[in-house]
Image: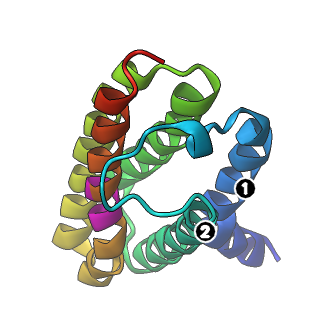
Amino acid sequence: MKQFIKKIFYLFLPLFLGSIVGLLISSSIDYGVLLKPKFSPPGYLFPIVWSILYLILGISYYFFKENNKDTLEEDIAYFLSLGVNLLWSVFFFVLKWRGFTVLWTLFLLIMVSYLLYRFYLKYKLSFYLNIPYLIWIFYATYLTLGVYFLNQGM
């Protein structure tokens, strides 16, 4: 039973935490009134994409843990990058720290890149599963920069 709970934890933690943060910040989301850069998706797409990405992140971490014994460095990188990711929404939507969030997004990009590098070294499937996540973080960086520059007076 303990192993089953551990597997569920690995698989669904990112999706669970992302859902909690989404619910907590939902009343603060002002995406609809912001000026957005070209190629910005409609607001309804974000929960769908993030749910898929969080699920992929959980699956890849589960596979990684099942196939590696010594994972301390990857564990730290995984949980730190997940925490940085989750805090982004609070900084951007609740606190409206748009400029800070640009820097935070760059930090997230570095953290996710490092995590994927560690996955690549020890279990390549976990790396490959997260390529869409990394691409989305690059896209989120573009969106964050665009929103910041287009809404500086707001």
> Looking at the picture, which amino acid does disc 1 mark?
Ser
Which residue occupies 35% across, 80% down? 129
Camera-side residue of 61 and 31 = 31
User: Could you tell me if the residues under marks 1 and 2 are in contact, i.e. CB atoms within 8 Å?
Assistant: yes
Q: Between residues 5 and 114, which one lies in front from this camera angle? A: 114
Give the side of residue 129 with respect to residue 48, left or right: left
Give x and y (percent) for residue 63: 45, 80
Q: Quadrant of residue 33?
A: top right
Which of the 4 image quarters holds residue 145?
A: top left
Main secondary structure along the magenta-highlighted residues = helix
Q: Quickly name the residue at label 2.
A: 51
Toward the right, the furthest residue is 1
Numbered range of the magenta stretch:
134-138
Amino acid type of the residue that numbered disc 2 sits on in the rendered structure: Ser
Q: In the image shown, does 73 or 99 lie closer to the viewer?
A: 99
The answer to whether 8 is drawn above or below residue 139 in the figure is below
